[in-house]
Amino acid sequence: MQQIRPRQLADWLSDDSRNKPVLLDVREPWEFELCHLPGSQLMPMHLVPTRLAELNPGDEFVIVCHHGGRSMQVAMFLERQGFRALYNLMGGVDAWAGEVDPTLRRY
């Protein structure tokens, strides 16, 4: 698992020569409704073990939460399950709002 800064992720997402990662948001539904990265999919942290079959271990994942703590835990769990291309969004959606998209709602 690697760490990725919001600006690095923004550059990756805007680079048409690279495959886009799966943006896996592990926050709660109410948090996701407040704000989320465009194109992200919601899978609350507590549901990841039971919904593991929905995820392709061959994909590249950027795991997202509010500040980076829950996403780090999920990334470590996925790593133990055999997933290899994992990135934790450092600072979460809060850092994304501060560094990339100031229009994103903060909470």
Image (cartoon, rainbow, N blue to C red):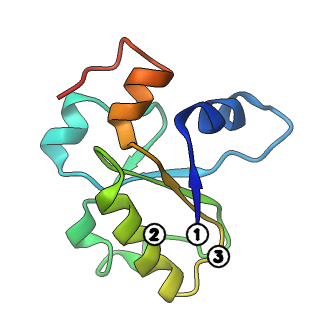
- Identify the disc placed on residue 63: none
In the rendered image, residue 80, in percent from the top left (x then y), is placed at 49, 88
Image quadrant in which the C terminus is located: top left
In the rendered image, residue 78, in percent from the top left (x then y), is placed at 47, 77
Question: What residue is shown at x 44% (from left), y 42% (from top)?
Answer: 40
For residue 24, side relative to residue 18 (left or right): left
In the rendered image, residue 94, in percent from the top left (x then y), is placed at 32, 33
Q: CA distance from mark 2 to mark 1?
A: 7 Å
Q: Quadrant of residue 47?
A: bottom left
Question: What residue is shown at x 52% (from left), y 80% (from top)?
Answer: 79
Mark 2 touching mark 1, by CB under 8 A?
Answer: yes
- Identify the disc placed on residue 84: 3
Question: What residue is shown at x 64% (from left), y 61% (from top)?
Answer: 60
- Which comes sooner in the sequence, label 2 or label 1? 1
Amino acid under disc 1: Met
- Identify the disc placed on residue 75: 2
Amino acid under disc 2: Ala
Query: Which residue is denoted by mark 1 in the rendering?
Result: 1
Q: Element type at marker 3?
A: loop
Question: How many neighbours does mark 3 have within 10 angstroms: few (below 14), some (14-19), or many (20 or more)?
Answer: some
Q: Element type at marker 2?
A: helix
Q: Element type at marker 1?
A: loop
For residue 29, side relative to residue 6 (left or right): left
Nearest-to-viewer mark from 1 and 3: 1
Q: CA distance from mark 1 to mark 3?
A: 7 Å
Mark 1 touching mark 3, by CB under 8 A?
Answer: no
Question: What residue is shown at x 26% (from left), y 20% (from top)?
Answer: 105
For residue 86, side relative to residue 19 (left or right): left
Amino acid under disc 3: Arg
